[in-house]
Image (cartoon, rainbow, N blue to C red):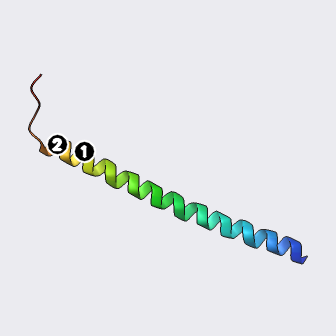
Amino acid sequence: MSLRLRLALWYGGLTGVVVVIVSLFAYATHARAHTTTISIACSSPPRST
């Protein structure tokens, strides 16, 4: 296996790991904000229309 191929696979794998970590962080942040919004909406008194 050539050095060029090994470096390409290494950097590709590293990039994939970074993308997964950033995606999980974004998902967790969004889920937390959504849960907080729903919790506030459920605990507040109903609005009169």
Return the mark for residue 42: 2
Identify the element where label 2 is drawn: helix
> Which residue is at 44% across, 54% downward?
27
Q: Quadrant of residue 10?
A: bottom right
Given the current orientation, which residue lies at the most extreme top position? 49
The residue tagged 1 is 38
Q: Cβ–Cβ below 8 Å for labels 1 and 2?
A: yes
Q: Position of residue 4 (x, y in %)?
A: 88, 73
Position above or below: 48 against 16: above
Lateral position of residue 35 relative to residue 28, left or right:
left
Lateral position of residue 22 relative to residue 47, left or right:
right
Callout 1, which amino acid? Ile
Position above or below: 21 against 30: below
> Which residue is at 19% across, 46% downward?
40
Is residue 1 among what the camera can see? Answer: no
Given the current orientation, which residue lies at the most extreme right position? 2
> Which residue is at 57% across, 62% downward?
20
Q: Position of residue 16 (x, y in %)?
A: 65, 63
Lateral position of residue 6 relative to residue 14, left or right:
right
Return the mark for residue 24: none
